Image (cartoon, rainbow, N blue to C red):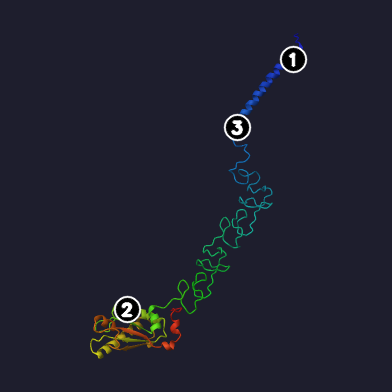
Amino acid sequence: MLMLSFPRVAAAALTVLVLAGLAATADAAGEAKKRAAKYQNTNDDKIYDLSRPWPFREGTPEGDIDADGVLDEKDRCPSTPRGAIVDQFGCPSDADGDGVAEGIDRCPNTARGARVDAYGCPSDDDRDGIADGVDTCPDTPRGAIVDSKGCPSDSDNDGVYNGIDECADTPRAYAVDDDGCPIPISEVGQKFLDGKAVAFNVEFASGKTDILPQSHGDLDRVGNVLSDWPEAEIEIGGYTDSQGSAESNKTLSKRRADAVKKYLTDNYSKIKPRNLSAKGYGEADPVADNATAEGRALNRRVQFTLTNADELGEETETRRWKRRGE
């Protein structure tokens, strides 16, 4: 039988313990190296990635499919869009009733019935301050003053809305332009009102009553005025130069005055023939010297004279503006 002394046994045991400790230390160091390498190649142990928005989590948390903070087992509205404010049951609120939940709604006080975009903000195509869907007059011109329904007002009833109308108190009798201001009558009309007469050098074929085309423009200006002023009574006076006999000139001037009357009544249906009278004055009342060609040309004229100015009275002033419907 082999007999060992106690000191030897103790020494052997100590050797075994030392060797076991060294092995454990080596294993621990190896595990530490593995963990260090793992930490260098993964983000699994990070606390929070600041590049991620609220809520402070990545992906969908387990048990909360819409990530609204209410677990699916309690969530009565499991498909709530991200960012919506929800109650304890996971359901979003919508104070303005526009279909966009609070928390997502960037225009939380939208009027009921307004059409909104995905962010809850209303559209206003005519930019009158009343949202589409509420606006009962959706095509209001820019600048017009509107009521709560988006409809413009027109205090002087001239067809131009308040806010655009630059002459907001126009009398109802007058026609207006795009700015709502009365339209002045033509220059020819002003001459009738100021001088009660207007004259043109109407050109005729030599020795005849045929009106030459270059004179149509002047006669048309007279025709437009008289069409808008049916109560006016006009004398058409024909004049000639001093060439030829006085009697023949008087006859020719009357025939030419008749030709002018016919032109006006044929081309302007609103003119009443009975309100036009034609007279021939021949070479009377020259306005220029018959000794020169230029003077004679000026004397060959047709003059239109307002004969009932006194009867028309105040209308000769109010006629300075174009009437509605004229």
* Residue ID for mark 1: 10
Closest to the observer: 74 or 176?
176
Residue 255: x %, y % from top left: 29, 87
**Number of other residues with Cα within 10 Å of mark 2, as a class: few under 14, some 14 to 19, many 20 or more:** some
Question: Going 72% across and 14% down the picture, which residue do you hit?
Answer: 11
The reply, left or right, for residue 213 in relation to residue 118 is: left
Is there CB contact under 8 Å for labels 2 and 3? Answer: no
Q: Which of marks 2 and 3 is nearer the N terminus?
A: 3
* Kind of residue indicated by mark 1: Ala
Whichever of labels 2 and 1 marks the residue nearer the N terminus, that label is 1
Q: Is residue 25 left or right of residue 267?
A: right
Residue 110: x and y in percent read 60, 60
Question: Can you say whether 168 is above or below 292 in the image?
Answer: above
- Mark 2: amino acid: His
Residue annotated with mark 2: 216
Q: Residue at x 75, y 12 (%)?
A: 7
Dot 1 falls on a residue whose secondary structure is helix
Q: Rounded to the nearest whole Å, what is the CA distance between mark 2 and mark 3?
A: 103 Å
How far apart are the alpha carbons under marks 2 and 1?
145 Å
Give the spatial CA distance, label 3 vs label 1. 42 Å
Q: What residue type is labelled 3?
A: Lys
- Mark 2 vs mark 1: in front: 2
